[in-house]
Image (cartoon, helix red, strand yellow):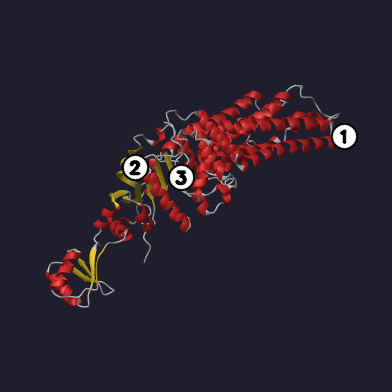
Amino acid sequence: MTALTTAISPAPVIDERQTFGDILHAEWTKLRTIRSTGWNLGTVLAGVIAVGMIVCAATAANWGTMTAADRAGFDPTFGSLKGLYVGELAVGVLGALVITSEYATGMIRSTLAAMPGRRAVLAAKGVTMAAVVFVVSTLASFVAFFCGQAILAGKAGISITDHGALRAVIGGGLFLTVLSLFALGIGAIFRHTAGAISAFVGAVLVLPAIVSPLPNPWGRDITKFLPSNAGQAIFDVHANSGTLAPWTGFAVLCGWAVAALGLAAWLINRRDA
Amino acid sequence: MITARHLTKRYGTTLAVDDLSFDVLPGRVTGFLGPNGAGKSTTMRMIMGLDAPATGEVTVNGTPYRSHNRPLREVGALLDARAFQGGRSAYNHLLFLAHSNRIPRRRVDEVLDIVGLTGVAHKRAGGFSMGMGQRLGIAAALLGDPGVLLFDEPVNGLDPEGIVWIRNLLKSLAAEGRTVFVSSHLMSEMAITADHLVVIGRGRLIAETSVQEFIERSSDVHVQVRSPQNDTLAWLLKTNGADVELAGDGALAVRGVDTAAVGDLAARHAIVLHELLLSEPSLETAYMELTHDAVDYRAAS
């Protein structure tokens, strides 16, 4: 340890307010310097690509023995993007952890002491996380699509310019991005990692499983509006009565995320740190 | 400086802080004492704008914490030990704090050097010992070179060398004119380090005074005298109106007269004295006496 020299050169008088840019800078530094971010994004990348390729490879392998009805029912775009279901869980964990791990470790107090504007902190977390999730998941969707189509070449492969394919691929990136924001909102509401992830998994996996077997029209009509079901419409090229129209479904998912984040923003100012 | 006025905080039905008012002035170390559950951590969180008081207000340098432009440049605090995410390095932990308040990057290296963590700056903080984690928290408090410092149990986990280092750090910070507010249970350290005290119990203010006056206020200040003619001396003192008690080790504890009076009295009656001193209680005994009724969680003894 050195001798005590605690003072720095005289600091200038601080008149400028803390800007959103400062908060954004801090949250970006936080996001890019913790190991779990890389792990989660790596899982998204690997999961989306690998599962898509496996589905396409299995279909290609079985193509010869499939019936005409089965072949017609197979959607090459949707098949290659099946990995997005794996991506759902990974972005859910990432979104929740971005906020819940601060409460778990007590670091939230350092964060809110450094940046007392709590809604701005929540917003900055959302912006930085959404940016990286969008880049990684859109990249993953593109790679999954092209690899899948390459595997399916000659049997069921299509081109990116085919009807709905480009929208589905970019939509896959948008889907995971908005889901991560939904998870962030849930995380900020629960402030507890296990609770938030359970609630997220409940909304995305368990609720559809419980609701869809209900007698129609309730089963079918309510399920369409559940977060992941509604969002999936954007990368499902073939419309059917069980899903909303692509952008309508995406808008419903956005609505879920806005509701979760809105409630979180309201709560974060009222509750103690 | 810190100014608290009529702070009240409830958690459910529990009244954690009850109409608490005090001032913490710059240029000296102010100790914040109280039994467990007295409301010290709650009060510090209210000062930092982390918990909202039910009524009352607290300001730092005249402004509520959350209204400061760059809070870290005005107030530095160590509230929780190991309050950081383990998957990030110490350097990066301080870096994001620096970014949030536009503190220059070189300051991160400076504070790491001050606390002695330069060698492990780029190791993940999850692997730190308790003492290292504590040092990281202190580094974060010093990062903005603030004029006001709050420390909650700063010596937790520090080895003897670290305890001496903290003591000197707190004193030098106060000597530089900063406001230093330290909460601690380590009475021996508080006695040496603090100049002024704010003592609370069950959420209420018990005392706000200098350390010296606090000790003197305790009823345990007495003259200790030892003589081969204890009985005679005791009788003489009682006749002169003093209150005399026989201590366990054979000395007399005399209250009501000063040492000079005892010495003169003994000399007038040719009584030999082997020991004559003014016994002041330690901060610990003064504190225990004053907060006796305010202790919520007392072990069976």
Instruction: Please provide percent x and percent y for residue B6.
Output: 30, 41
Q: Secondary structure at mark 3?
A: loop
Gap between marks 3 and 1, in whole Å? 78 Å
Q: Residue at x 29, y 61 (%)?
A: B281
Work out whether disc 3 and disc 1 sit on a shared chain: yes
Q: Report the label total.
A: 3
Q: Which residue is mark 1?
A: A64
Query: Is B108 on the left or on the right of B21, as rendered?
Result: right
The amino acid type found where label 1 is placed reads Gly
Query: Is A215 on the left or on the right of A186, as rendered?
Result: right
Q: Is residue A210 above or below residue B193?
A: above
Q: Secondary structure at mark 1?
A: helix
Query: Is A11 on the left or on the right of B9, as rendered?
Result: right
Mark number displayed over residue B146: none
Label 1 Cα neighbours within 10 Å, binned few <14 / some 14-19 / many ≥20: few
Instruction: Please provide percent x and percent y for residue A51.
Output: 74, 38
Instruction: Please provide percent x and percent y for residue A192.
Output: 53, 44
